[in-house]
Amino acid sequence: MKVPFSWLKDYVDIDCTPKELESKLFSCGFEVEETIELGGKTDKIVTCKILKIEKHPNADKLSVTQVDAGKFGKLQIITSAKNISEGDIVPVALDGATLYNGERIFNGELRGLPSQGMFCSGEELGITDDWYEGASIHGILIFKEEYPLGENVRKILDLDDVMYDINVTANRPDCQSIFGIAREVAAVLGKPLKTPDFSYKTDSGISTLETVKVSDEAPELCPRYKARLVKDVKLAESPLWLKRRLFKMGIRSINNIVDITNYVLLEIGQPMHAFDLNDISGKQIIVRRANVGEKIVTLDEKEFKLTPDNLVICDKDKPVALAGIMGGLNSEIKDNTVNVLFESAKFARDNVRKTSRALGQRSDSSARYEKGVDYASVENGMNRALYLISSLGCGKIAADEYDIVDKPLSEKVIKTTVSKVTGVLGIEISQTEIKNILERLYFGVKLNGDELEVTVPLYREDMESYQDIAEEIIREYGYDHIDSTLLKTAAITGGGRTGAQKTTDNLKNLLVGYGFNEIITYSFVPEKDYKTFSKNENADKLIKIINPISEDMSVMRTTLVPSMLRTAAYNVNRKNFSARLFELAKIYTAKSVPLTELPVEETVLCCALFGENEDFFTAKGVVEGIFDIFCYGRDVSFVKSDVKFMHPTRSADIICGGEKIGVVGQIHPSVAEEFNLDKPVYVIELNYDKMSQLFNDKIVFRPISKFPPVERDLAVSVGEDVSCAEVMGAIKKAAGDNLESVYLFDVYQGDQIEKGKKSLAFNLIYQSRERTLNVEEVDESIKNILKLLKEQLNAELR
Amino acid sequence: MDKFEQLIERVKEELGGISTVRLLGDLKAKFMGKNGEITALLHSMKDVPAAMKADFGKRINTLKVEVEKLFGEKENKLKDDELNARFKNEAVDVTLPGKQNACGSLHPLNIVKNQIIDAFTGLGFEVFEGPEIDTDYYCFQALNIPKDHPARDMQDTFYFNENILLRPHTSPGQVRTMESKKPPIKILSPGRVYRADDDASHSPMFHQIEGLVVDKGVSLCDLKGLLDDFVKTVFDGDTKTRFRPSYFPFTEPSVEVDVTCCKCHGKGCSLCKGTGWIEILGAGVVNKNVLEMSGIDSDVYSGLAFGVGIERITMIKYGISDIRTLFENNVKFLNQFKRR
């Protein structure tokens, strides 16, 4: 919200500097985001009189002028301007001057002659005809008045004003106007507020009610509609003060009637519209929902096809305005307009927003309506517009008007107690202070003991309860009065992370210890990922965002692997050739498509390992490490995987508790290629939610056996297709109870062994908890093992 | 020179040629072994006349002690030499780099998230994570943002359909907690949130932590106390907070919370744009409509809520200027966060 400091002074006697007021506004909830100087950077530009103009001896297009700049003396200025004459008073930028846009001017030499400054155009001073007539011409600004010479142009052009750009929060639409902000300024400074002049003269011979018939058929979308006839309108240029106010707010002057509606929007915050009554067929105005397929062409000559969701203002036959957004071309104010019907209305903000979005049509008016216009400003806006018409003498105002309201207008009363209000704040504030603050904000206050009754002005539609009252008080009283207490009345709660949350942290710390860097990637991915990664090829089950930022972020992911591969590729491209990465994040699976209920969100752990020291077994080792620590004693097995994005002979499904809970191995080379990864990347993907069902954090102490272990190495040759797990399984099965541990220490395939066979060498440790084992029983166990291996796997001792 | 002296000289001479402990053993056997020369001399004592026997015995004893001493010295020297040779052989350049068992790192956003959680769990807060895909009711309506509310424009939300969306804030965590738990409530609800914004200071996915206290008689002063405590844990111990009026539909009064700039400590610098203060979070007293919609009696209980943007805190804390750095996951970036 742009607010000129000088304009605020119309309503409040401000006795502090713009900077001081800025900090006061900040403390009561109106942050000034930017302060804009009306005069821009303009500096050291003064009036001067041109005494003599001569042709430049060395340049056809330049003139040499002698000027009188008052106390700055007689100067020689070289110029290319053609619109100046001797005797003109013009602005001159002196040595070291700054133009509006920040450009600097210094003494110089032009074609061999010194020039002690530069004449300025209106544009170089940041102004147009709306500010000073003649400022828009192409050439030097020539003053019409006999200004004293050597005077600062900022002063004589009245450019010493600042404009605040104030951030008004969404709950305060009543402050979306100069007058609305002025109310807050008066309150925060504790000064009286001067109400704008709402008085006007009417013509008793003119009646709105007898001339036009107005009806509101959609009060739910138009809770208040005012219409007033103004006859014998004299379209003309607006007075300078009006043009200048609009100029400050960045609005171009059109004519007095249009300017008045714009002025009222800025000052009162009420959008106004003016219809040319001659164009209103049947002299009827009907506020209603559009019919299906009904069309309107708006002022900017765009055509829209409407639906009953759109509110329109119609005459007997057709829409003449898109309510709150823009008038129709068919009823616009023209040079020959004589009779005008003024509209001031409250339209439902969400409907204006929806229509504006749906049609892609916006205006200052719709922007204002979207924030919310209150019942009171409908009245103030109309009255202020009529005041301007009356005082500018640009029309005859009807003696009566339409004012259609959906409910009787009465001020809301909030009944509460002082202790409830101060309870929200946690500090004591005296009743006098409370009353004083609320009254400064134009609330009616009745105090009876602890009881507090607050009457809310119509424009404060945001006020609902004691909490709102508490906020009003504290923002005026000052947030620096809030003490710091630590929940002094609250109950003690234990708090802390749950066991599962702690385990997650521990798991992450383990991975960090294993050398993994944690990554965070977006939860939405390109749809094309699913050609490669979807499990069931049922693309219909994808959860798609209706309004994605881009195609690359349009679908909720069902696996973390593609994001992980993109991160790997990103790093490899930046010469980070080896890394271990992990992400613990959610995947999203629809129960049904289209979504009728919330999808399933499951937490997944994804790891990637790449670089010269990594292989299938380093990745698998990480999985084993995790299970050894977090799922101790659970039966984990690795079974050749057929996951389609994995390397078919270097990947394994991770089976635990009889269920597949993940996959480990090398990414399929052709998938890696899609991601521009030419070296192997190993990944682990584990369903963390399923895995956490298997967490086992119970530590059971087992005494260490006092009896000596017996160690045996066993190398067997088996067919190359026989898996280590099969051999190991057979060994465990046949060994008997005393086998304490068995591990594989060598795999051999080569010259020393028959083709098609491989050798597996195991280290077996036997140990009893009750006694010393004798050699015979160990030998017996080995014999049993070999026998079973032979029978089941055709394995031979080597 | 008699034969004793000759023998000593010979021992010395032969010892001089010995270079290993094994050869020394052989030489010792030659002189002192069962068939050694000195042993033989000892055996020859029986042939020495009785009168000379005592003298012979004494001399032979001296000889033996002397030879053993020579062997002992030689052995020590040889062992020293061998050890020194080994040390020379085994020498390492201690300035060569150690073999790394390279540690990884947690993501900086999670480091900061953990610090925030630690600050509040110490005060009795629990941690609750709600769904990221949630309904319009939990994301808006139950937070006092009805369908026509202009505050819906404050966040540009990603939708799956009219009713199901990616949560634009962690505030639905408040509602879900209040629905399932009776006061006293102290929870934190961290997680991913989503808004349609993508530039150097906005990411379409980012992280928040929502905090909620519901109990009897909690006030704005308690909120100030909680947040004062929190900022001291996450920033410096001398960090101060400032409340300034703001607006959120689910709190009333609502405040923006600023902290004294962690770079200039309030003097004014480029980070705080010369103001000495940095905006870090939004907070307030829970709107009674929100309490009531979740089935909590607002006549008995009051609530405090705050929402922290983890990215913002992380960027301020570590001086990261572009939010996208956090999601590129460059290992060279991540490795800087090993020291937590």
Image (cartoon, rainbow, N blue to C red):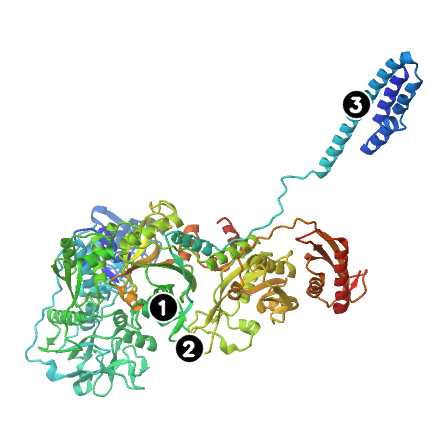
What type is the residue that disc 1 sits on?
Answer: Cys
Q: CA distance from mark 2 to mark 1?
A: 17 Å
Q: Quadrant of residue B30?
A: top right
Percent across and percent down for residue B296 are 29, 65
Q: Is residue B107 above or below residue A246?
A: above
Residue pointed to by mark 1: B139
Q: CA distance from mark 3 to mark 2?
A: 100 Å
Residue pointed to by mark 3: B69
Residue pointed to by mark 2: A596
Q: Secondary structure at mark 1?
A: helix
In front of the other: label 3 or label 2?
3
Q: Quadrant of residue A717?
A: bottom right
Q: Are marks 1 and 3 on the same chain?
A: yes
Q: Is residue A704 above or below residue A642?
A: above
Q: Secondary structure at mark 2?
A: loop
What type is the residue that disc 2 sits on?
Answer: Thr
Percent across and percent down for residue B217 are 26, 57
Instruction: Give the label on residue A453, or none.
Output: none
